[in-house]
Amino acid sequence: MTSRDIRQAFLDFFESKGHQIVPSAPVVVKNDPTLMFTNAGMNQFKELFLGEAVAKYPRVADTQRCLRVSGKHNDLEEVGIDTYHHTLFEMLGNWSFGDYFKKEAIEWAWELLTEVLKLDKDRLYVTIFEGDVLEGLQQDEEAFNLWKALIPEDRILLGNKKDNFWEMGDTGPCGPCSEIHYDMRSDEERAKVKGQDLVNMDDPQVIEIWNLVFMQFNRLKDGSLESLPAKHVDTGMGFERLVRAIQGKSSNYDTDVFQPLIQFIAQKSGIAYGSDEKSDIAMRVLSDHIRAVSFAIADGQLPSNNKAGYVIRRILRRAVRYAYTFLHFKTPFIHELVPVLAEQFKGVFDELYQQKDFVEKVILEEEVSFLRTLTQGIQRFESYTSDTNVIDGDFAFELFDTFGFPIDLTELLAREKGMTVDMNGFQQALLVQKERSRAATAIDTGDWVLVNEDKESEFVGYDTLKSNTEILKYRKVSTKGKDQYQLVLSETPFYAEGGGQVGDKGFIRSLDTNERISIVDTKKENGLFIHYVNQLPNVLVGEFEAVVDDKKRKDTEANHSATHLLHAALKKVLGDHVNQKGSLVSPDVLRFDFSHFAKLTYEEIKEIEDIVNAKIRQDIPLKEERNVPFQKALESGVTALFGEKYGDHVRVITFDDSYSKELCGGTHVNATGQIGFFKILSESAVAAGVRRIEAITGTKSEQVIREHFELFDNIKELLNNPKDFVSAVSKVIDENNALKKEIENYIREKSQGLKDEIEKKLEKVGDINYIATIVDLPNADAVKTLAYALKGGINNLYAVLGAVIDGKPSITVMISDDLAKERGMHAGNIVRELAKEIQGGGGGQPFFATAGGKDATGLEKAISKSREFIK
C-alpha cells in the first residue's frame, strides 16, 4: 500500500464506524496561550475535553499535522539521527466525546490494524496502565480483559504512570492509556530476543505506533484527580511509523513519505543515499525539516527572531547547516524542495500547494541570509585565539546565540583545529539563557473556581455593547510577579482578541452593590471568552452590567473594516497573488501584512488610498451573514485566509458583493462612511515576500493630518515663510552640506598635523613600533582616520589612541597586519582588556578595534597598560 492508500484506508474505516471526518487544524496555534504549535491530534478538540464547548459530532476522525520542536515535546535533536523521530508528522486519530469508550476503541483498533491494514498479529504487543499506589489508581482491568479477548495474554504488558497514564499538561483532562507496539525486526532477531523485552526500551525496530487514551479524570492544580462528567476517547497513531510497518521498512525515511525528497536531494548533491552515514543523516534532516518549515509558513508563521517564528527559523537554519557541512551546498538549495513536497501533499493538505511559490521564496530569502551569517560565524571562529586547546564555553555560546551555530558545528570546527569545546561552560551559558527566558514568560495559573454552575457563556457583542450578566467562574493568574484574575461571564458584549483585532476593554458593575471593576483585556482560550481584571469584585454572586468602552470599540471597528477595504484594493492594484499574512487592528492603528515581493511605489500607494477612500465616501452598508455553511461561503467567492481554522458554519462580512467579501469573526462599522478617512503611514518589508502597511482612519487620521500641517507651518516660519518652500529647504540642505565638508577638511588637516606630532613619540620595543597616547579630536571618525594614517606610514605598528569625545572616553587600537598574523597580536582582545580601565567594553578585528567607557580618569592607566600586550 502507498502512504496515500494507508491514510485513506484509516479515514474510510472510521467513517464506516460513524465518525465525522474533519480537516487538519493549522500547525500554528492561535487563541491558546499554552501552545505555539499543534503538537498532538487532540489540540483542536481541547475545549471539548475541558467542557468549555459542546461537541457538534460525538465521533470524529482526522489526520492532523503536528509539530514537536519546543517545550515538553521536543524531538528536534533526535531528528535525522534515528529512524523514527520527526519535527512535523501526521497524527491519525479517532475521538469519542462522551460516546463510546474502551471497548469500541480497542476492538476497532485491532480490526483496522489486523484485518484492514493486514499487519502481522504475531508482531503486535499492547500495554495497559498498571495502576499507581500514590495516586490511588488501580490497574486498568477493563482494558486488560478487552485485550485478552483479542491477543495472547503474554503480549499484554503493564506500563507505569510515565508510559501509560496520559496527561494534557500539569492540569487538565487525563487518564490511563493503552499503547500498541509493533516489532519490525527480522525473524532471526525475534527468535533471539522476545519482543516483550524490548517494548518501551527505545529499540528502533520495536516501536509504538498507536496510543489509545481513555480520558476519565481532571488533574487539579493541587495535583489531585477528579472524575470527568463524561468519559472520552482520544487516540493518536503516528502515520509515518504506520506506513513504515505496513511497507516493511527499517526506517521511516525509507518509505514513500520521505523517499521522493531524499532522492531529489541525492540527485542534486551528487551523493547517493546510503553511501555515507553523515550525508545520510543530512538528507534525513533536510527531508524532515522542509516539511515543518513549509507547512508552518503556509499556515501563517514566518521565520523571525522571537517565539514561534524563532523556532521555525532555528529548524530551517539547522537544515541549512547540515546541507552546507555534509552535502557541500554552499549556495541556497533547500527552497527547491518545496515544489516536490507540495506535489506530494496535493489533495491532502492543499494549503501548501496553493502557496508553494510564496513558501519557496520565503525559504530562499532565509537561506541567503543564514548562509551569509554562517560565513561570518566561521570567520569569527577562525579569528578566535586561545592559550589552550579548549574553546571557551562562552565563545561557543556566542556562536550559537549570535550566528545560529549549533554546538555540534562548533565542535566539528574545533576538531579540525585539534581543539575541544568547553561543553560545561556552554551548557551553563545556555541554561542561564533558558532560565531567563522561562522567568520572563512563566505564568502560574490557578484552578477555575465555580460561582454559577450549569450555565454556558454567550457572546452578544455583535449586537450590543452592554448587557446584564453573571460571573460563571474565575481563576487567578500570576506572571512576572503581577497577579490578575480571569473571569468568565454568562453573557458578554466584550470581543475577545482574535483575527488580528485586539480585545475589548470596559467594566462590569454589580447591580446589587454598584461596585465597578475595570476589564483591562479580553482574550479567547480554547473557545472561552476570558475577561482580565486586576481585582475581583467583593461580591461575586448576583447580577452585573457588562459595558464595553464605546469609543475604543468604534475606533477599532473603523480600522478593522478598513483592513477589508485595503485587502481588496491591494488585490486590485497589485494582483490576485496578494493574500493576508497577518494583521493588527487596534483603536489607534491598523497593520496589514500581505504577500508581495516588491516595494510599493508612490503611485501604487496613492492608487490604493484613492480606492479605499472612494469606497468610504460611497458609504457602503455592512452586509453581515452569520452561520453560513462553510462550503456555501466558499462557493459564493468569499476570501478565506490560510492558517485559519474555520468551523462548519462561518460569518461572512461583505462591503459591496463585487468588491470585498471575507470570512471574519471581528466587529465592523455599519457602513463604510463611518471609517471617515484612510491614510497609509508606512509601507515596509516584514520578511521575504511579505510587506506591511500601517495606516490610520477616523479621528486618528484627522489628528495626524492636523499635526503635519502644524509641523509644516512651523518649518515655514523658521524659514521666514518663503514663497517657494521646496527651494528654501534645498538651499538650507546645500549650505549644511558645504559646512560639513569644511568641517571634514578641518578635521582631516588636524588629524594630519597630529600624525606628524605623534610620530615623534614613536618608541621602539624590539622590532615593534609602539605608540600610546591621548589625542584631542572631535569625533570617532577623526580618531579612526588618524589611526589608519599612522598605519599607512609605519611598519610593524602597534598604536593605542585614547580620546575624550562628548565627555566620554574611547580607546582605539591599531596593529599592522604582519604583527597580527605573525605575532598573534589581536586588537579586539587588547581593547577589551584596556576598556576595563574606563569602565567600558568593545571589540573588533585583529588589526583594528575600538572601545568606549564611562570613566575618563582611567584613560591614562589604560594607555600605560597597553605596553603589557606587546609580544
Image (spheres, rainbow, N blue to C red):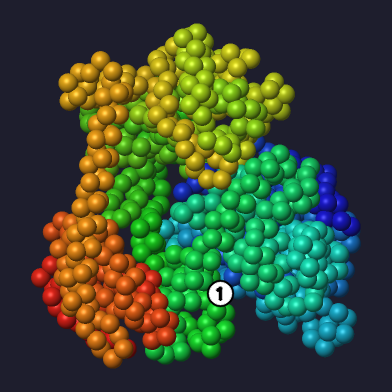
Question: Which image quadrant for residue 312?
Answer: bottom right
Count the marks.
1
- Judged left or right of residue 439, residue 665 is right
Asked if residue 150 is positioned above or below residue 59 in the image, the reply reads: below
Residue indicated by mark 1: 409
On the rendered structure, is 248 left or right of 101? Answer: right
Residue lying at the far top of the rendered structure: 618
Could you say where residue 637 lies in the image, as x and y percent from the top left? 68, 22
Work out which residue is located at the far left of the displayed protein and give it.
Answer: 857
Secondary structure at numbered mark 1: helix
Residue located at (29% from left, 79% from top): 798
Position in image of residue 514 (x %, y %)? 22, 27
Q: Is residue 513 above or below residue 392?
A: above
- Rendered position, 459 above or below 722: below
- Describe residue 36's horizontal placement relative to residue 152 as left or right: left
Q: Amino acid at mark 1?
A: Leu
* Quadrant where the C terminus is found in the figure: bottom left
Can residue 465 be seen by looking at this rendering?
no
Q: What x and y, as percent, mark residue 14?
A: 79, 47
* Quarter occupied by the N terminus: bottom right
Disc 1 crowd rating (10 Å Cα; few below 14, some 14-19, many 20+) is some
Which residue: 51% across, 13% down? 615
